[in-house]
Image: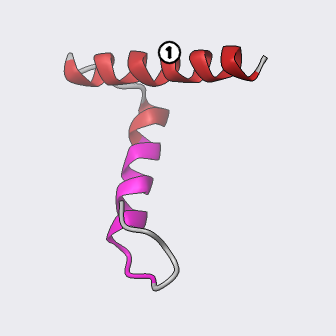
């Protein structure tokens, strides 16, 4: 069951990456990616680097 869930998640990520390469990106996905980028830029002694 966890293998199936993992494959589904990977499939969704792959789809989003393909859309991004083609210049098409869901607004929600774009917001999430920008949020991740901002989190990576913020200095924090406890977080790992992105």
Relative image position of residue 45 (x, y in whole percent): 46, 85
Left or right for 24, reference 2: left
Per the image, label 1 sits on a secondary structure element best described as helix
Report whether 38 appears left or right of 10. left
Q: Residue furthest bottom?
A: 45
Highlighted magenta segment, given as a residue range = 31-44
Above or below — where is 44 with respect to 38? below
Picture coordinates of residue 2, whole percent (x, y): 74, 23
Dot 1 corresponds to which residue?
11
Quadrant in the picture for residue 35: bottom left
Circle 1 residues within 10 Å: few <14, some 14–19, many ≥20: few
Q: Residue furthest left?
A: 22
Q: Residue sitting at 44 percent across and 69 percent down?
A: 48
In the image, residue 14 above or below residue 44: above
Identity of the residue drawn at 43% across and 44% down: 31
Residue 50 is one of the magenta-drawn residues: no
- Colouring mode (rainbow / by chain / secondary structure / one colour): secondary structure
- Comparing 31 with 1, the one in front is 1
Q: Is residue 34 magenta?
A: yes
Q: Is residue 8 left or right of residue 42?
A: right
> Which quadrant is home to the C terminus?
bottom left
Residue at 21% across / 22% down in the picture? 21
Left/right placement of residue 2 relative to residue 28 reads right
Quadrant of residue 6 in the image? Answer: top right
Please determine whether, in this image, residue 12 is positioned above or below residue 35.
Answer: above
What's the residue at 49%, 73% (across, down)? 47
**The N terminus lies in which quarter of the figure?**
top right
Residue placed most toward the observer, 9 or 37:
9
The secondary structure that most of the magenta stretch takes on is: helix
């Amino acid at each position: 069951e966890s293998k199936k869930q993992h494959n589904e998640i990977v499939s969704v990520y792959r789809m989003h990456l393909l859309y991004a390469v083609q210049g098409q990106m869901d607004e929600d996905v774009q917001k999430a990616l920008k949020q991740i980028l901002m989190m990576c830029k913020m200095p924090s002694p406890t977080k790992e680097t992105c």
